Image: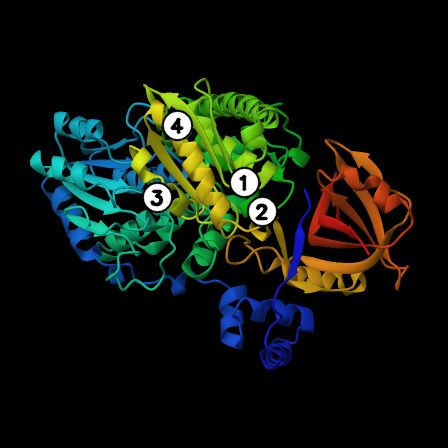
Amino acid sequence: MEYKWTLKTQGNSQFVKNITKELKVNNIIANLLVQRDIITYSEAREFFRPSLKNLHDPFIMKGMTKAVKRIEKAIANKEKILVYGDYDVDGTTAVSLVYSFFKKIMPNDLIDFYIPDRHEEGYGISYKGVDYAASHNFSLIIALDCGIKAISKIDYANGKGIDFIICDHHLPGTHLPKAYAVLDPKQKDCPYPFKELSGCGVGFKLIQAFAKNNGIPFKELETYLDLVVVSIAADIVPITGENRILAYYGLKLINTKPRPAIEAIFSYSNIKKNSTFNLNNSTKDSDLFFSKDISISDLVFMVAPRINAAGRVSDGKASVRLLIENDVTLIKQLAEKINDNNTERRALDSNATEEAIETIATDVFLKNSKSSVILNENWHKGVIGIVASRLTEHYYRPTIVCTIDNGTITGSARSVKDFDIYAAIDHCSDLLEDFGGHKFAAGLSMRPENFLAFRDKFEAFVENNITEAMLKPDIEIDMEIKLKDITPKFFRILKQFAPFGPGNMAPVFLTKGVYEEGFARIVGMNHLKLSLSEVSAPLVHFDAIAFKQADKYDSVKNGFPFNVCYHIDENNWKGNVNLQLNIKDIKLS
């Protein structure tokens, strides 16, 4: 796939000059800060040294006082409380956090948790879940990461005498459900200053408020920050403002004293060595450490898929049971189970992706379309979102992957940068039973007889509203630099920009006129290993890795200079740590 390179607008020169002087950093670091709207010494201090003291007062959030008082009343009156959440990572971490907190301060027979079944109940609050609460005498439900649009379900619960406290972070609709209290910073009249909390983040603010009102030291809440950072990573919320503080301390906890469940999940990776959960039962001292600092990326690719897998192919409750468990033997059993779920999920989505690519390649309509709308009734409902993401990466065009579940077509949609797939689906809403989502991702359902008409109408809308530029993936480059600018001191400062994620992505640099020193080779699954120098500074050289770019081998071996855009990483191999360029793309000069 050919990428377009876009060099970001450079920071205001006067701001860059001021930051350079005040922080005593070079022009490159100063420019990266100004690009992130950090223009004063105090802003830089907060950025580089996040503090839990800078978390906002939870009672600023609309509905918080009412929510806390209702929980206090339930505890005082010995009412039963049900903690309810979605089956994805954000929902299960949120449920684990809130359930664990209240389990410590109230009789355990008065609190329980509930995760809906993806196939029988679907996303969010369900009638079946409300019926479960009613039949088991729960009079208060705390709903996490869902509920902001569950108007009819909340009315149904009200009719059964069940109060709801909704803790959500999704955009509300025109009308709010008639819950006892609604916590969602995205409510139009909510004064809470940070709007981008994860669902688990809203749950954390709830326990923060309860703790503050009941004399519980904040220190006791810090043990839950590992759950919060996992939700932040998995839900792809901006890692700015309050999320940056929560993510920073959550990662710090994971790297120093993670909960046993997260240790167990990492035992299935190649970066966690721990005697308690080591699969090889090694007890050597050299095996008792994280071989690298755990990052947001590690949580996204190693922890989140396993937590998600239970809800995709089995039972989302298993993820909560793992995250709240302290017994080592049970943790091993539960971690193995969700790892097996993840293995099954990978096989399902891999097979479905291969079948989808083959279908598109052999279907004249799909092959020549500006979108991919594809249906296979044998695909597992739990993986169609992943398949949609993979097809979007492969073809880089708006994509909807569908299957049939209980006689109804269910679809998952993913988009490309700058194209509003929600608007495209809304244009075809007359052919749908239901749909929801946002600009880049959505879900839908329809009757089977409407599929072809929907596919044609959706494709027509895309063709009329998408541009050729939108169909070409873009790499945003922070700055052009020289290889000689990359020093150990420069990288030490650059590492302090972490945690990286939306709103604060790892910087991408451009260096022109480099050449390969004669060590290029193809490694692993079509990766390219290189050793690079600059034409203008041949004594400065760096090892580099270009993942899935083995097709560039001949281009870099021909002796001509080329341009690279890249991240700067550390390569930790058998205890030897070296700087390495992680190349995103290569273009001939």
Q: Amino acid at mark 2?
A: Leu
Name the residue rendered at 65%, 68% in the picture: 29
Q: CA distance from mark 2 to mark 4?
A: 24 Å
Which numbered disc, 2 or 4, marks the residue that appears first in the sequence?
A: 4
Q: Are marks 1 and 2 in contact (CB under 8 Å)?
A: yes
* Residue 327 visible to an observer of this rendering: no
Q: Amino acid at mark 1?
A: Lys
Q: Are marks 2 and 3 in contact (CB under 8 Å)?
A: no
* Relative height, residue 485 to residue 554 (above, below): below
Q: What SS does tag 4 mark?
A: helix
Q: What SS does tag 3 mark?
A: helix
Give neighbour class at mark 4: few <14, some 14-19, many 20+ (Cα, 10 Å). Answer: some
Q: Are marks 2 and 4 in contact (CB under 8 Å)?
A: no
Left or right, 441 with respect to 430, comes to right
Which numbered disc, 4 or 1, marks the residue that appears first in the sequence?
A: 1
Depth order, front residue of 412/177: 412
Q: CA distance from mark 3 to mark 1?
A: 18 Å
Give neighbour class at mark 1: few <14, some 14-19, many 20+ (Cα, 10 Å). Answer: many
Name the residue rendered at 65%, 34% in the picture: 287
Q: Amino acid at mark 4?
A: Phe
Give neighbour class at mark 3: few <14, some 14-19, many 20+ (Cα, 10 Å). Answer: some
- Per the image, the residue denoted by label 1 is 370
- Per the image, the residue denoted by label 4 is 451
Which numbered disc, 3 or 4, marks the residue that appears first in the sequence?
A: 3
Which numbered disc, 3 or 1, marks the residue that appears first in the sequence?
A: 1
- Per the image, the residue denoted by label 2 is 471
- Per the image, the residue denoted by label 3 is 426
* Relative height, residue 537 to residue 561 (above, below): below
Image x and y of residue 414, in percent: 47, 40
